[in-house]
Amino acid sequence: MSEFAGIQASVSRRFHDPATLPKEIFSDPEIYQEELKRIFYGRYWHPVAHRAELPELNSFKTAWLGEVPLLIHRGDDDEVRVFVNACAHRGALLEQRKCGKAKEFECPYHRWLFDTKGCFRGAPGRKDFRPDFRDEDFGLRTLRVEEYCGLIFVTLSDETEPLSEFLGEAGQPLADAMLDDGKLTLLGYQRVIYQSNWKIYIDNDPYHAPLLHAAFRLLDWQGGKGEMVTTDPEGHMCILYQVQQYKDNGFLKDPSVVQFKGSDDRARVIALRPVTGITKHIDTINIRFARPLGPDKTEVHYAFFGHESDDPEYAKHRVRQASNLLGPSGFISIEDAAIYQRVHATSGDCGYQRFVKGVGKERAEWTQNDEVSNTVWWEHYRSVMGFDKA
């Protein structure tokens, strides 16, 4: 029996239902390694960039999918390709910059050269290479890519279903968050490392928002009409609600920072499984590209966007509102880092995390203030990891 098989059997005996989570799934290093194989490198689509981050032909961005380095490039043919960011020779990291423009990529180790379609184009000493060497065998590894409303998705599995099937009912809320046409402009980034497991980070239930976040109370943003969309089987979770205009109560010195200037008062908070958060709230559009750094750390790149049609005044407003509202230290989200750490801090006590609010309701009765919708993901996770075998 493999080491994970033993852990799998032990966890299965405690993981009886998707509303009662044995805490070792958040801290065990063997479970984390198996998650990389089954989830991050398995049959899932992962958002890795938005086309707005590749504003010109030959723009590129580097990123990570688990421990796999990615090179995302918009070619001079306007096609976005994603390569494993490793030289096909000795595996050196090919491109180290976060972003830029390039018409070719050269490995610094032995000066092997690759074009923007990932093809090998030459190297010093070529005439002395092994007799069976063929150029076509030494291109960059190219991954499957699909695009939706400007979002670039990638999968490492040849068996992953088409993106439209993977998104399911989350497709329309996602399109709404990307302002339907996806013609966004990049405003900027913030980066943070949370001291918690990736599943604690992404499993941020809607029940907590008005209770944990002081801004919801101080700005009187509670009680707006809304609904919940949760997809099967992956459990993508979409919280849809109406934005309430802030009525100046003297709390903010400059209330314009939370002013709503748009025409669509519908907000969207989306958890795309396994680990991407997307939010459109008031005039802020935010994609949170996340990467697990082990069982106890999660790196999140907050990317903020405007729209191509924004006039200069509106664009400036979005910049002011973006990270002030939804960044790692924003009005709404400032308490999150502390609570992720506090939840993770107890993950070694052999206890359980439990969901209660809304559990037992018929699905048609679920609301955006319950936590029962999270259990759809946990039932899926339990199956994918083989923890439902008890």
Image (spheres, grey):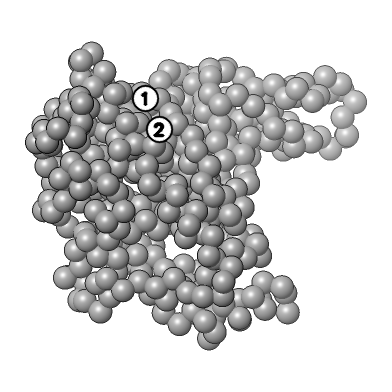
Q: Nearer the viewer, residue 12 or 340?
A: 340
Amino acid at dot 1:
Leu
Give residue 68's quadrant in the image: top right
Residue at the farthest right position: 128
Q: Secondary structure at mark 2?
A: strand
Q: Which mark is residue 186?
A: 1
Task: From this view, report whether residue 4 is shown above or below residue 106.
Answer: below
- Residue 353 picture location, percent across and down: 44, 71
Q: Residue at x 25, y 43 (%)?
A: 215
Report whether 41 appears left or right of 275: right
Give residue 91's quadrant in the image: top right
- Residue 284 picture location, percent across and down: 26, 33
Q: Nearer the viewer, residue 73 or 300?
A: 300
Residue 175 can be seen, yes or no: no
Q: Is the N terminus in the top left, top right, bottom left or bottom right quadrant? A: bottom right
Q: Secondary structure at mark 1?
A: strand
Q: Residue at x 79, y 36 (%)?
A: 90
Report whether 244 appears left or right of 68: left
**Of marks 2 and 1, which one's residue comes earlier in the chain?**
1
Q: Nearer the viewer, residue 357 or 341?
A: 341
Contact, CB < 8 Å: mark 2 with mark 1?
yes
